[in-house]
Image (cartoon, helix red, strand yellow):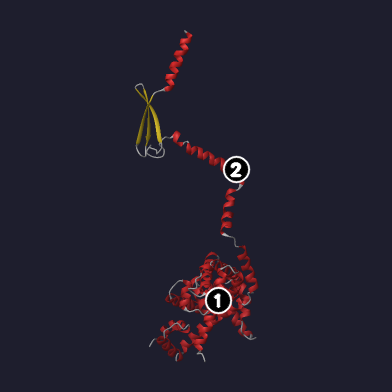
Amino acid sequence: MRNCEAIKKSLGAWLDGELDPGPAAEIQLHVEGCASCLEEKARIERLDSSLKRLLEANASQVDFKTFWAGLRQRIADEKSWHTRVLEKIRPVFSPRRVAWAVPAMAVVLVAVLSLDQFFPGWRGNGQTNMASVESIDGHGFNVALLREAKTKTTVIWLFENQESEDETSAESASSDTAF
Amino acid sequence: MNKTPSATSKEIRLGVETAEWELIRKCQKGDVAAYEELAAKYYRRVFMVILGMVHHRDDAMDVAQETFYRAFKNIRRFQGGSNFYTWVYRIAVNLAIDFQRRQKRSIVDLKENMDEVVVDAETSGGDPLREVQDRRLGEKLLGAINELTPDHKAVIVMRAVEGLSYKEIGRIMGCSEGTIMSRLHYARKKLKEKLGTDL
């Protein structure tokens, strides 16, 4: 048999109907014969009913028409997701900002594109994936090398310098005429 | 053929739930008129729970409207796994707890705001002594509740005002029945201590 202190700890749960039948019957039996626990039970009941009465009285003053009018308005004002996204983006693209942003972006773009010219190999180990063509002197022949870094491919061209031959013949022709 | 009382009540309950589910299905298709019916059914109960937590009538009105607005916005996600009011209460309690953490009003404001309510709530039947006692109890009760944490307030209001079971409260608050029992015991104990002989 539990004492008053233990019973009082479970009184709330008992009044709420949350105890199993065994403990509930035990508490009921105790409360019926104990003035102190009976008073504690009455205090819990008064507490709950006072709170309920207080809030019910206030809630009864709330008119549904007023409540619904506010709620209806909020629902009506609800915008679609794309409208909300556009509204967020729009200030970013205001004419005043765009007026500054466009030239600024152009300068940045030019700067980035010309980085390779001023700082060759700035992207990493100096190798690029782009092919490069170099001309070297090949003992009277013109040699061009095409190097492609990614696949490590090298293509070699040997060719005659047509321009210099033309120039020589033109020079000799003109000298002939001079003489 | 006579039906047993329990069978009849079960059928009625089932009928109400079916009708409510029909309303919910309409709301999920964007039917605002159907939502008005649902809101009319539950707004007062939701308002009471919120008021018990935020104490100020205007604040409670704002939070209650926000609750129903969010419920409507998200009603497509409601699959009927729980009662509609449990689902709405969960939104309401979370919003009320957030609201309390963001905004703290002074107890003086609360008393001024609730004075008329205490008078309205009196069931003294014209007995001046009882009226004074009720007013004093109401004021002290408000002050005492205000000192509880948001979680304790939520539990005592849902139990005392709504009569929800520990299981339902646990589902709304996202915790076990044992936790609810413990919080409720603590909240009642604190309130009884604060109210003293006025209770």
- Spatial CA distance of label 1 from label 2 is 57 Å
Return the chain for callout 2.
A
Mark 1 vs mark 2: give the one in front: 1
> Number of marks in the image?
2
* Residue B181 % position (x, y): 44, 78
* Residue B190 % position (x, y): 49, 76
- State which quadrant residue A54 falls in: bottom right
* Residue A67 % position (x, y): 63, 71
Quadrant for the C terminus of chain B in the image: bottom right
Query: Which dot marks residue B20?
Result: 1
Amino acid, disc 2:
Ala
The single residue placed furthest to the top in the displayed view is A179
- State which quadrant residue B175 falls in: bottom left
- State which quadrant residue A70 falls in: bottom right
Packing grade of label 2 (10 A; few <14, some 14-19, many >=20) is few
Packing grade of label 1 (10 A; few <14, some 14-19, many >=20) is some
Q: Residue at x 53, y 67 (%)?
A: B76
- In the image: residue A95, left or right of residue A32: right
A123 above or below A35? above
Residue at the spot of label 2: A99
B114 above or below A91? below
